[in-house]
Image (cartoon, rainbow, N blue to C red):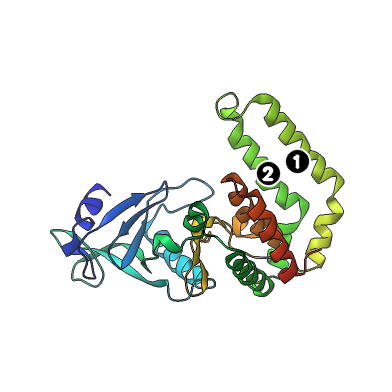
């Protein structure tokens, strides 16, 4: 990957004209940010919940990423393009040589229209939040459902996620969370499942388990001429098939985490109205 990163940081090797290329890396991808477009290559990793270990899997997940994200972001996810080695350098796009990988090509979204940017600048308005709530309520209402997806809303299936969270957090007791808080959270969660099994069944009966976004954060919500939401979970259905309220709660928690409790309450009120939640 080192040579790919070095080569694709050169503007002349980009498939579209650009004056500069900046690079952002996460634990699962390398993102090349050009003047007008963004190109994302998935890293060859396997974390269990995510498997990008082969070129074929990475290509398929690139295709899936484009398909799924187009549900909420028209005109941003443009294509899946090859990563080609021409014998000298790695290039993006249609070139002679060996196709070694694939990348998602996206339209670059200006930072200043992201919900997180507006919130931090103090310019996130009630009108913005109404629009976000409306778009997400309509998305949740029309997203795929059905028996295969609905089983992920069962209490036992939901508990798989929370159990996994506690297993992954436990090694960090005393470092990022104290033991008393950890035990209290775990006990409260266990108690909720034991007391509210009927609630999970009720939500399934209401058709509230859908193929959702799976990772709603303010930095994924674009507030331009129309609301667009990017970067949904493509690599694990278990993270995306969920209760619509659980999906929306990610965005509320992100607002609260950044000090926006009042805005989170308003956003929830707007969503409840549009989604007809009690």
Image quadrant assignment for residue 252: bottom right
Q: How many marks?
A: 2
Confirm whether residue 243 shows in the render.
no
Q: Image height check: is 196 above or below 58?
A: above
Mark 2 / mark 1, whichever is N-terminal: 2
Q: Image height check: is 64 above or below 233?
A: below
Residue at 84 percent of width and 61 percent of height: 202
In what element is the residue under mark 2?
helix
Viewer-closest of 44 and 137: 137
In what element is the residue under mark 1?
helix
Return the x and y of residue 52 as percentages of the image width and height: 43, 54
Residue at 45 percent of width and 64 percent of height: 113
Furthest-left residue in this view: 88
Q: Is residue 171 left or right of residue 108?
A: right
Q: Label 2 vs label 1: CA separation?
A: 8 Å
Q: Image height check: is 29 above or below 72?
A: above
Res 218 label: none
The answer to whether the residues at label 2 and label 1 have Cβ atoms under 8 Å apart is: yes
The quadrant of the picture occupied by the C terminus is bottom right
The residue where tag 1 is placed is 189
How packed is label 1: few (under 14 Cα within 10 Å), some, or many (20 or more)? some
Q: Is residue 14 left or right of residue 218?
A: left
Return the x and y of residue 212 as percentages of the image width and height: 62, 64
Residue at 42 percent of width and 50 percent of height: 28
The residue where tag 2 is placed is 162
How packed is label 2: few (under 14 Cα within 10 Å), some, or many (20 or more)? some
């Amino acid at each position: 990957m080192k040579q790919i990163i070095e080569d694709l940081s050169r503007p002349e090797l980009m498939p579209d004209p650009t004056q500069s290329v900046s690079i952002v890396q996460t634990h699962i991808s390398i993102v090349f940010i050009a003047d007008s477009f963004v190109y994302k290559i998935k890293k060859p990793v396997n974390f269990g919940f995510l498997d990008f270990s082969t070129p074929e899997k990475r290509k398929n997940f690139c295709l899936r990423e484009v398909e799924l994200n187009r549900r909420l972001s028209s005109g941003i996810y443009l294509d899946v393009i090859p990563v080609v080695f021409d014998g000298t350098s790695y290039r993006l796009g249609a070139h002679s040589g060996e196709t070694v990988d694939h990348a998602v090509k996206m339209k670059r979204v200006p930072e200043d229209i992201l919900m997180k940017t507006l919130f931090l600048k103090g310019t996130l308005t009630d009108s913005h939040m109404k629009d976000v709530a409306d778009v997400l309520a309509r998305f949740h209402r029309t997203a795929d459902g059905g028996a295969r997806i609905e089983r992920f809303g069962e209490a036992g299936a939901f508990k798989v996620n929370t159990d996994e969270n506690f297993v992954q957090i436990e090694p960090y007791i005393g470092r990022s969370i104290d033991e008393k808080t950890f035990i209290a959270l775990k006990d409260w969660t266990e108690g909720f499942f034991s007391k509210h099994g009927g609630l999970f069944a009720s939500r399934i009966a209401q058709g509230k388990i859908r193929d959702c976004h799976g990772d709603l954060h303010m930095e994924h919500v674009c507030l331009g001429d129309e609301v667009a939401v990017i970067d949904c979970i493509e690599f694990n259905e278990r993270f995306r098939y969920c209760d619509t309220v659980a999906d929306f709660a990610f965005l509320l928690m992100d607002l609260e985490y950044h000090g926006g409790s009042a805005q989170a309450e308003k956003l929830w009120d707007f969503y409840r109205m549009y989604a007809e939640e009690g």
